[in-house]
Image: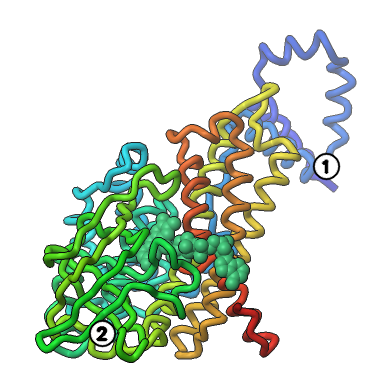
Amino acid sequence: MTNPISKIKQAMKLMKSIDLKQLEAISKKVDLPEMMNKFAELDESQMNSLVKMLNSSGKKRELPEINGDFYETHLRLKPEHRKIQLQVREFMEKEVKPLVNHYWLHDEFPFEIIPKFKELNLCGVTYEGYGCPNLPFIMEGVIASEIARIDASIATFFGVQSGLAMGSIYLCGSEEQKEKWLPKMQQFDVIGAFGLTEPLVGSAAAGGLTTTCKKTEEGWILNGQKKWIGNSTFSDITIIWARDVDDDNVKGFIVENDTPGFSVEKIKGKMALRIVQNGLITMDNCFVKDENKLEHANTFKDTARVLQMTRAGVAWMATGCARGAYESALDYTRKRKQFGKPIASFQLIQGHLVEMLSNLTAMQTMVYRLSELQDQGLLKDEHASLAKVFCTLRTRDIVSHAREVMGGNGILLEHDVARFVADAEAIYSYEGTKEINSLIVGRSITGMSAFV
Ligand SMILES: Cc1cc2nc3c(=O)[nH]c(=O)nc-3n(C[C@H](O)[C@H](O)[C@H](O)COP(=O)(O)OP(=O)(O)OC[C@H]3O[C@@H](n4cnc5c(N)ncnc54)[C@H](O)[C@@H]3O)c2cc1C
């Protein structure tokens, strides 16, 4: 039985928490003596709950933190790697986010971020030596995702420099070539580009390159065109893949952009990844010294080794882009009110948010496993292709839900989601389209090639 002294104490506490003016107003609406009788019948625990409820009723309820990593996948990272992830996040939020919409709109590259990138000292993420950080592949993904969470163009710039261009030299270069180029590229003192696609040859690059190389006594002569080449309008070097007219094999070259016969025209009018400066390259009897022929790039299989590594990075990039869109949309729906309530409190809006989060969470768990395979030396082309297909497809879906829950504001650049919607389109197509990556996975699971 409840001790009467304790009951009196509780009643006093309750009285303290009651505003007398409010009590007067209430007495006009309810039968107060009857209510007091009911209070008297409450036991101690019921009384405590009532006091607690009254004390908390005036407080504003804290909303949960916005967190696009719902399954806390970051817990798989070692503390020193988690620290790097948070450093990149801070850098992107503080230094890059305020700039990107302006540069995206004006179709220009923010060169002022390069010295700040240099300070992060993360370029050439996984490579050993040459001033590179020698981090596990999982960190290459984490970094790509953190950059893309704020802006997919900057992630693409970094992916071309650190992945495609440096990766070609790291995987296919001679020791002298690595010593000569990688330390400078790691410091962004030399900017690189990667030229594989041509105006008339995209998906069919493996067997159909029309850019040619011809051995001469002094070196090599390159002729042909390359289209869509990211960073090439301002890069110092471009990795060019060309078919040898003598043995019909694809070979790789480090072409210095100021080489006579090598010219770059900026591709204008893009509706996605507008910060990335893509170029149309023309090589007209462009002479490349022997020392700039990538020593170990002698068939398309060598090109494919580079692409396998970077394709995994694109899956991570898509995941970051999707996370950025989801988090922006969630934030917006909690602030935007319609019918007197935050739209996040509407069931149909929560349906959109949960669908986005389900896909995002599936993507995150997939790319973590993908990088684990890579770190264990078990990654195959089809693994990277499956993740590239799934993540870029789901990203398109997530950004369209994000745009939808924002109503008209979803198409305004200032709310960021419009940029994610547009950029998801380019990520979907580059580094192998959905069809081409599906054919790679299809061949692996059926044992039958459906390539034409
Ligand atoms: C923003 C951006 C940046 C890029 N950066 C670079 C870069 O830095 N370096 C570089 O080398 N390239 C770059 N690319 C090129 C990119 O990799 C190609 O766009 C991509 O490989 C597709 O080639 P394509 O555009 O010529 O399309 P196409 O090959 O013409 O394909 C058109 C359509 O046909 C489909 N298709 C083709 N073949 C088949 C088939 N056998 N079966 C079924 N469907 C098929 C494709 O899936 C696609 O849907 C970039 C592209 C973009 C958009």
Q: Nearer the viewer, residue 199 or 344?
A: 199
Where is mark 2, residue-wise? 128
- Does residue 113 appear anywhere in the picture? yes
Q: Is mark 1 within 8 Å of ligand 1?
A: no
Reading the image, the residue beneath label 1 is 43
Helix, strand or loop at mark 2: loop
Tag on residue 258?
Answer: none
The residue carrying mark 2 has its beta carbon less than 8 Å from ligand 1: no
Of the pair 241 and 363, the residue shown nearer to us: 241
Query: Is 307 above or below relative to 6?
Result: below
Q: Earlier in the sequence, mark 1 or mark 2?
A: 1
In the image, residue 158 sits, relative to residue 277, either above or below, namely: below
Left or right? Give the position of 256 relative to 24: left
Is residue 72 visible in the rendered image? The answer is: no
Q: How is the image coloured?
A: rainbow
User: Label 1 vs label 2: CA separation?
Assistant: 70 Å
In the picture, residue 191 is in which quadrant? bottom left
User: What's under tag 1, amino acid-wise?
Assistant: Asp
Residue occupying the point 12% across, 81% down:
289
In the rendered image, residue 48, in percent from the top left (x then y), is placed at: 72, 41
- Location of residue 241 by image quarter: bottom left
Q: Nearer the viewer, residue 30 or 90?
A: 90
Q: Nearer the viewer, residue 86 or 208?
A: 208
For marks 1 and 2, give the one nearer the viewer: 2
Which quarter of the image is occupied by the C terminus? bottom right
- Could you tell me residue 110's position as x and y percent? 25, 47
Residue at image position (18%, 81%) is: 220
